[in-house]
Image (tube, helix red, strand yellow):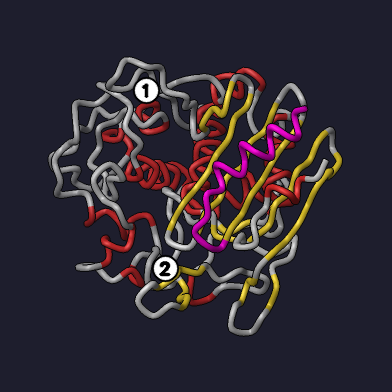
Amino acid sequence: MDFSSKITENFSGVISIKQNGSTIFQMAQGFADMPNKVPNAPDTKFGTASAGKAFVATAVLQLIEKGALNFDSTIGDILSFDLKAIDPQITVRQLLNHTSGIPDYFDESVMDEYEELWIDVPNYRMRTSADLIPLFINKPMMYPRGEKFQYNNTGYVVLGLIIEAVIKMPFDAYLQAAIFAPCNMTSTGYYEMDRLPAKCAFAYIYDEERDSYRTNIYSVDAKGTGAGGAFTTAGDVEKFWDALIGGKLVSKEMLEQMVSPQAGEDEDGDEVDYGYGLWLFDENMPSFCGSDPGVDFVTMYDMERQLSITILSNMDYDVDEMLEELYEMAAE
């Protein structure tokens, strides 16, 4: 199969397709460091934006299975700071499936650009989940808890804070101990943008006025939070899928819940294809994705075919369309 025929010249990143434990296609294209002409490579670490929600959800489900939390635990009982107008009866389940109604610091239904967040608040101050609290704490509820599904970044910031309240350690340190280390995901972590480790790709945004590219260092949080921001590689994403689907991170029963619709219906009365931290590409095909200025990421796993496709890009690119095209070829 000529998978490379689906990849355009302007793609910058890494693509990996794995089936039945073997890599059937992998390629790297473009530059991790454009001015210095450092090429992207299979082991390059890429920012993944909201993809980290899958890791946070997995960690929360682990804590539920251990009895440290339950789906009906409420934020009012767990968190110690003043919630103001936020409903203290919002549950962990409602945060996981985006039905909480909690005020969203970045409401993607009304805000076009993530960079708009930093007009009044410097992004370099955003280095923990708690740093984002001032961006939503004084806002009203978006709708009564449990009323409907609406994708919500604050919900996962709060899940990160819940992990920290229960475990008494930074959420990213807990993810390292509970997920990344057990999966041997040695190239995955939450890094500060001004202290990136080796083999990280810079993310590039095209500036139409100057006809040139700039990095996204002033466009995103200085360090990822519960809402997203992990750096990872294609190989580490595949290790995560193998461990998750293989029952090494959560039980088979919990995995079935994670990859089944959990969000109810949307405003049009249609069932939402979202489980816990995972979108459902199709039946038995969980996926997760992320998009930030200069960052586009998507991965999916066909549980029947034992087939995964992972796309990481350090430029704005329609990775969803590419995923569909590659999957059609791989599933033939």
Which one is closest to the eye, mark 2 or mark 1? Answer: 2
Image-based side of 278 in relation to 106, left or right: right
- Secondary element under disc 2, as helix, strand or loop, is loop
Query: Is tag 2's residue or tag 1's residue first in the polypeptide sequence?
Result: 1
Q: What kind of residue is marked 1?
A: Asp
* Magenta stretch holds residue 329: yes
Q: Main secondary structure of the magenta part?
A: helix
Residue visible at 35% across and 36% down?
A: 151
Which residue carries the number 1 mark? 72
Question: How far across and down, in percent of the image, does residue 292 sit?
Answer: 44, 56
Front residue of 203 and 181: 203
Residue 76 image position (x, y, % from top left): 26, 34
Vertical arrangement, residue 202 with respect to residue 279, above or below: below
Q: Is residue 187 above or below residue 1?
A: below
Please give the name of the residue rendered at 27% of the width and 45% of the height, measured from the top-left corner. Answer: 107
Which residue, given by chain and number where applicable, does mark 2 sit on?
222
Magenta segment: 314-332
Q: Which residue is rendered at x = 46% and y = 52% of the image?
A: 291
Location of residue 291 with respect to 75 vertically, above or below: below
Left or right? Give the position of 255 relative to 309: left
Comparing 321 with 248, the one in front is: 321
- Measure how far apart labels 2 and 1 are at the Cα level: 32 Å
Query: The C terminus appears in which quarter of the rendering?
Result: top right
In the rendered structure, does residue 20 fall within the stretch colored magenta? no
Quadrant where the image shows the N terminus: top right
Quarter assignment of residue 78 = top left
Tag 1, which secondary structure?
loop
